[in-house]
Image (spheres, grey):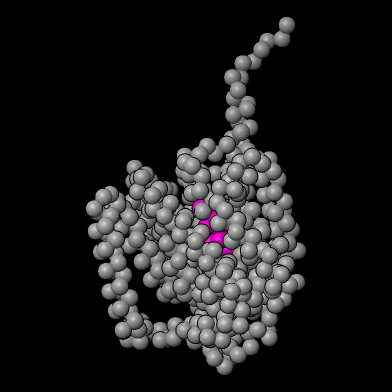
Amino acid sequence: MEAQNPSFGLDKISSQNRLDFAEKAFTVFSLLFFMGVFGFGPDDSETGVIPSSIITLIRYSTYAVTLLLLAFRINNTLKTALSNKWVLCLVFFISISFLWSQDPSTTVNVVWKELIPMFLLSLYMASRFTIEQQFSLAIQALLIAFFFSILLAVAMPSIGIHQTGAYAGSLRGAFGDKNRFGATAATLLVTLFMLTNYAEKKQRWTFALLIFCFAILMISSSLTALVLSVVSLLLVSLYQKFRWIGKKSVLLVNLSTLFSISFFYVIVSSWIEILTFFGRDPTLSARTLIWNYVITTKIPPHPYLGYGKGAFWSSERLISGFEYAAFHIPAHSHNGFLDLILEAGLIGFALFLITWFIAYIRAIRLAYNFKKASYLWPAIFLSMMILFNLFESYLILFPNINWVLFIAIALSLSQKPFCLRASN
């Protein structure tokens, strides 16, 4: 009779741990892909260092693996997807925009290659991981992208630093331009600040990384990202200092409203003087010219449905006129909300606002019920999402991590209880 080796289920636990690690590694890899980290290349090159065939292979591989993982836990997948009807309406509405698109073939291509894969990854994250785990995965992806960008700037400055044009000498790392790198660094800075302030045991590495990240952001030449990161840090401090209980909530709302109105008034009344002091163009690098032309000329012809996903900025006919109104043809409107209206119209924008507002209310409740950085993360991220899209297009125009995390957070917060759901 053979001797039995009582493993007490350790083999099963070990295999489960390996599976957990593999799924988390895949999620971080996918987030990096949608951040555009694999598309790095010289300024004047139309293609990146990694061949387009490899990028295509990565895209469809992540697509297939995500589908398999969702199918593997089909009950959780369906439960999560159906937990937030507004998210489904938003994604569905944008997906069918090929029906009225000015360029149906482009819209179908973009929906198939970008919108649906991002939604599936968001759905997988929300159905598989808790809010706390999602926060950890986001930090890992941001850290890898940040340090890889620094490595490129040091080892391959022809790629990691702008060599030509108005941005010459500015750090861009693995991203297309300095503003996208700045947004990534700013988001990482805020998450590190949250970890530093909310950790039960203070860890020196988070504080050291916080200082290093802030220093890099200071020399990145992205003033927009620097200013918005400071505003976001103030938001974190406010969330930490005040917990809206009873009359305190009313007081804080009133103070915040008064501060916001006062700040807005000072900025508007001293717009030119402030920007000139910082050595900036009062038109914010022609942003205001672009916004005015988009609002007055481009949105009115298709106000409710938009031009279709990916159709507007890819059409030479539709973008004609910017060379006269803004003195150049931009790649986007430098405002995520205007780009969303161009793609999905006011109806799509309204669906986004409803989805965001519901998620934000739930995120606020979560933030003040639990004193942990990971539970504050949804509220801060949703706030930063609004701030960052005022001056750049980080919403849905291009594949990006912001849209993935936004949908994942909205779906996660729709589940009850949204933060304490089992992750298996």
| Numbered disc total | 0
- Examine the rendered structure and indicate whether residue 366 appears above or below residue 256: above
Residue lying at the far bottom of the rendered structure? 324
Tell me if 184 is positioned left or right of 18 in this view.
left
- Give how far across and how far down residue 40 sits, in percent: 62, 68
Residue lying at the far top of the rendered structure? 1
- Examine the rendered structure and indicate whether residue 172 appears above or below residue 376: below
Name the residue nearer the viewer: 7 or 157.
7
Tell me if 113 is positioned left or right of 130 in this view.
right
Tell me if 201 is positioned left or right of 409 in this view.
left
Name the residue nearer the viewer: 40 or 336.
336
- Give how far across and how far down residue 159 sits, in percent: 59, 71
Residue at the image position 43 percent from the left and 48 percent from the top: 374
- Can residue 229 be found in the magenta stretch? no
- Give how far across and how far down residue 308 sits, in percent: 66, 72
- Can residue 403 be found in the magenta stretch? yes
Q: The N terminus lies in which quarter of the figure?
A: top right
- Give how far across and how far down residue 52 sits, in percent: 73, 66
Q: Which residues are magenta?
A: 400-409
Most common secondary structure along the magenta stretch: helix
